[in-house]
């Protein structure tokens, strides 16, 4: 178990129960997910840039990232709909607490 999760369960939940006046531990706010994203401005011109960013993000988070695509075309940025512009990772559970 990660140190943050242990501290949350042993110290934060009891103190928030008193502060918020709740009896139920499930009524206390908690983390559900952490999203780490990386936008790459020059990714539309250079395909290797996204590959390198994916490797970096996977080393940082321990999970392989998903590539993100442009939703709309923007002529000023020479960007077309569907072009890959970055990557993101959604961390939940044990991996989330280890990352945070």
Image: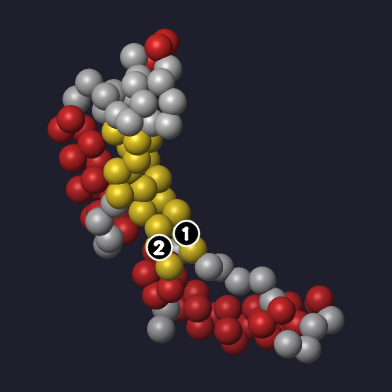
Secondary element under disc 2, as helix, strand or loop, is: strand
Q: Pick the residue in front: 61 or 70.
A: 70
What residue does disc 1 label?
34
Question: Residue 24, can we see it?
Answer: yes
Residue lying farthest to the top in this orientation:
76
Q: Is residue 25 above or below residue 42?
A: below
State the image coordinates of residue 81 (x, y, percent, origin top left): 36, 26
Which residue is pictured at 38% across the width and 15% down the height?
Answer: 77
Q: Is residue 4 above or below residue 35?
A: below
Q: How does the figure colour the protein chain or chains?
A: secondary structure
Which residue is pictured at 41% across the width and 83% down the height?
Answer: 1
Q: Is residue 78 above or below residue 58?
A: above
Which residue is pictured at 34% across the width and 21% down the height?
Answer: 80
Count of picture labels? 2
Q: Pick the residue in front: 28 or 3.
A: 28
Q: Quadrant of residue 76?
A: top left
Q: Quadrant of residue 75?
A: top left
Query: Residue 91: which numbered mark, if any?
Result: 2
State the image coordinates of residue 63 (x, y, percent, origin top left): 27, 60
State the image coordinates of residue 25 (x, y, percent, origin top left): 68, 85
Q: Earlier in the sequence, mark 2 or mark 1?
A: 1
């Amino acid at each position: 178990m990660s140190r943050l999760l242990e501290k949350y369960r042993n110290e934060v939940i009891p103190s928030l129960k008193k502060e918020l006046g709740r009896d139920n531990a499930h009524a206390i706010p908690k983390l559900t997910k952490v999203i780490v994203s990386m936008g790459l401005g020059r990714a539309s011109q250079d395909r290797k840039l996204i590959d390198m960013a994916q490797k970096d993000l996977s080393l940082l988070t321990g999970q392989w990232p998903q590539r993100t695509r442009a939703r709309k075309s923007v002529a000023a940025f020479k960007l077309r709909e569907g072009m890959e512009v970055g990557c993101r990772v959604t961390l939940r559970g044990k991996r989330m607490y280890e990352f945070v």
